[in-house]
Image (cartoon, coloured by chain):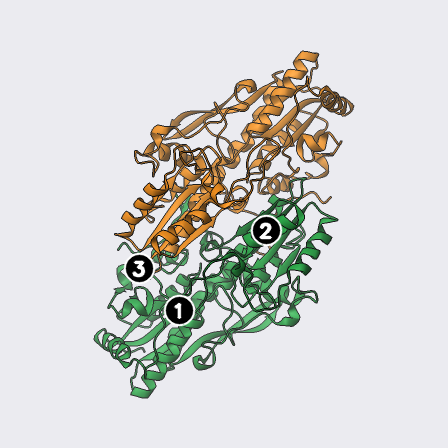
Chain colours: A orange, B green
Amino acid sequence: MLNGNVIVGQSGGPTSVINSSLVGVYKTAKDCGVRKVYGMRHGIEGLLNEQFIDMDDYIQSDLDIELLKRTPSSFLGTCRYKLPDADVNPEVYWRLFNILHKLDVKHFFYIGGNDSMDTIKKLSNYAKETGSDITFIGVPKTIDNDLAVTDHTPGYGSAAKYIASAMKEIIRDAKTYPTDSITVVEIMGRNAGWLTAAASLSRAEDCTGPDLIYLPEVEFDHDKFLNKIRELKKYQHAVVVAVSEGIKTADGKYVCEANKKNMFEDSFGHKALGGTALYLADFLGAETGIKSRGIVFSTLQRCASHIVSRRDITEAYTAGADAVQLALNGETGKMIIFERISNNPYQIKTASYDVNLIANVEKCVPLDWITDDNTYISKEFYEYASPLIIGELSPFMVDGLPRHLFIDK
Amino acid sequence: MLNGNVIVGQSGGPTSVINSSLVGVYKTAKDCGVRKVYGMRHGIEGLLNEQFIDMDDYIQSDLDIELLKRTPSSFLGTCRYKLPDADVNPEVYWRLFNILHKLDVKHFFYIGGNDSMDTIKKLSNYAKETGSDITFIGVPKTIDNDLAVTDHTPGYGSAAKYIASAMKEIIRDAKTYPTDSITVVEIMGRNAGWLTAAASLSRAEDCTGPDLIYLPEVEFDHDKFLNKIRELKKYQHAVVVAVSEGIKTADGKYVCEANKKNMFEDSFGHKALGGTALYLADFLGAETGIKSRGIVFSTLQRCASHIVSRRDITEAYTAGADAVQLALNGETGKMIIFERISNNPYQIKTASYDVNLIANVEKCVPLDWITDDNTYISKEFYEYASPLIIGELSPFMVDGLPRHLFIDK
């Protein structure tokens, strides 16, 4: 039996299934008899300003639960707040724990990626050091799939399904013309190419897939790229290429930096990428004289809840639910992870792992899954990723559009 | 009873439902006892090179018919070929009619937009002048919705549904952050703002809709735009704007031209647009210091068959089917049109219209449907467009992705 109340927050870039994890936490906590499940507005940044809701005010029926599962982007609002170290700024910790005490919160859940796990790590360590009995559990979430230890992360499967579906449609569109064209599709992924690799899932009986795939794990070379394109153009009118926004040249510079006067940096020091596809399309157009187009999935790939992976939705829910079970068992400073039992038939099990060994570590695509000339991804990736995009969850359509649950303030 | 064979082609920019019209032509012709239904590869451009298929080779079951309805982009391949005038280049007409005679084709159907109707006009007029008994019928198709006379065009409803759904998701994504941001979403439409106006359909009980909408029908003013943004920023963190790729300033120049060294032109003399959103995002970022992002739907808006409007699919089929009925009645030089009987309940009927009065005429959004300060669209548009996005047609999902019918050569 849980004692005290629960609070849950969402942090970092949204996904299509982040609210399914929220539902998993909420429903399991309520089923376990918790009186209040609070939701932080805009993660820990909002909580520090005492912004939170009582989840019961918004989830009043099983219909609301199903609607929330189908709602993209962070229902509670998100933030990109970097928690300072406790020895540098203890006041922030005092303020936060004071708010938690006031709300009689005993269990704190944070749904997020790498940076959010840094928050769980700091808070759980602080609690241990100060003898607090509040537990802190991380629920994994990121379309980037770059969290360490876990087999994959909730959010990745749905983003991969969107990317592969949209790639099929883009390829079909590009190849319907009898004229020469080059299409460069830019996909998210700063240092890890998991999302860009998902473009390869579009290769099937009815689709060639992209002709080339460039991941940020390996060095990008403009000349080799141009030669590859010229080679392909000998045999086909339309060439379609998938590139990660984070591809870098040998000097360590992002390809997209060539196009920008200054790069915006967020509070974690990450440069705002983007512009890679347009830059490369301009480059290829100038070099080959062929009509070249850049397509950027932008935020669509992380919020397209109208085409989620049902498996992803279910696993996201499970991650939230199991996080509550962990807390029930008195655990803290842990993140829920998935362990793969087999690819075919696909089986996983959940477990938990010390968040200190997960926070701030990035998991990239294994180099031996990238083909020898660095222009495609191997069948090992296909075996790994293809089970993650299986199944659909139909949106609730109202007046022809997907309906979402929302906070009206 | 139809005498002789049928040939059908697809031309111009693809849509999500252009193959539903193809199915409508094919199935109706077969049901009427036509022996052969040929499909032109890459429209009239391919036909002139004697590239065509026998549709029976690809449609072998009712499952194939349903699969083809769910396949985006032109199944037969498309072209952007401008047929020369018969008095300038009669050889092209001799060659074409010779091929039609060889195939014993008596009925020619062309699924396309404005430029394609120009082809139907020229061919039907040539046939009349030369005493040919071959009929030429146009089947309307364009996401742009800019064909004259008809209430709307097949393809528009599905593009509008995609745009409104994606806008909802983008808005939810943008507004989940507590930080200031401006998002400029670029939507297709050279001179007609129908598609951009569809962004307003995202305004509903659960969504604010875009804050501003700029159509190409009215002059774009950078200063007024900036003032509007500054005004909105007083009350909200995130601002989301929908702009047409074709917006122009008072001097008649496309806004996106400011960003480009040279503009590619197609065979109809249309400039290749694009870059409006990124240019405006850079402009706003520089002027306001606020993080600004451009999102471009690009070809996704015309090929996202995974979220089509069922009403659009059905009407596209009907347009193809009724075109065959017209030919049966001996008509030529006509295009199928839709006439709106009522908005609520939504009722239309099909009719036919002289293609000479349709070809090369562009229908724009009525100016009195654009709000006084040129920054939004009126409720008359909502009443007109909202019925067109109703209903879904689930894709056939194989291994987690929509399956398409394809020509394997």
* Mark 1 belongs to chain: B
Q: Which residue is mark 2?
A: B281
Q: Nearer the viewer, residue A214 or A337?
A: A214
Left or right of B229 in this view: B41: left
What amino acid is found at the position of numbered circle 3 in the picture? Ile
Left or right of A33 in this view: B306: left
Q: Earlier in the sequence, mark 1 or mark 2?
A: 1
Q: Which mark is residue B59?
A: 3
Q: Position of residue B39 (x, y in %)?
A: 30, 66
Q: CA distance from mark 1 to mark 2?
A: 37 Å
What amino acid is found at the position of numbered circle 1 in the picture? Ile
Q: Nearer the viewer, residue B309 or A267?
A: A267
Q: Earlier in the sequence, mark 3 or mark 2?
A: 3
Judge the density around disc 1: few (<14), some (14-19), many (≥20) Cα neighbours within 10 Å.
many
B224 versus B234 height, above or below:
below
Q: Position of residue B370 (x, y in %)?
A: 65, 67
Q: Quadrant of the N terminus of chain A?
A: top right
Q: Tag 2, which secondary structure? A: helix
What amino acid is found at the position of numbered circle 2 in the picture? Ala
Q: Quadrant of the C terminus of chain A?
A: top right
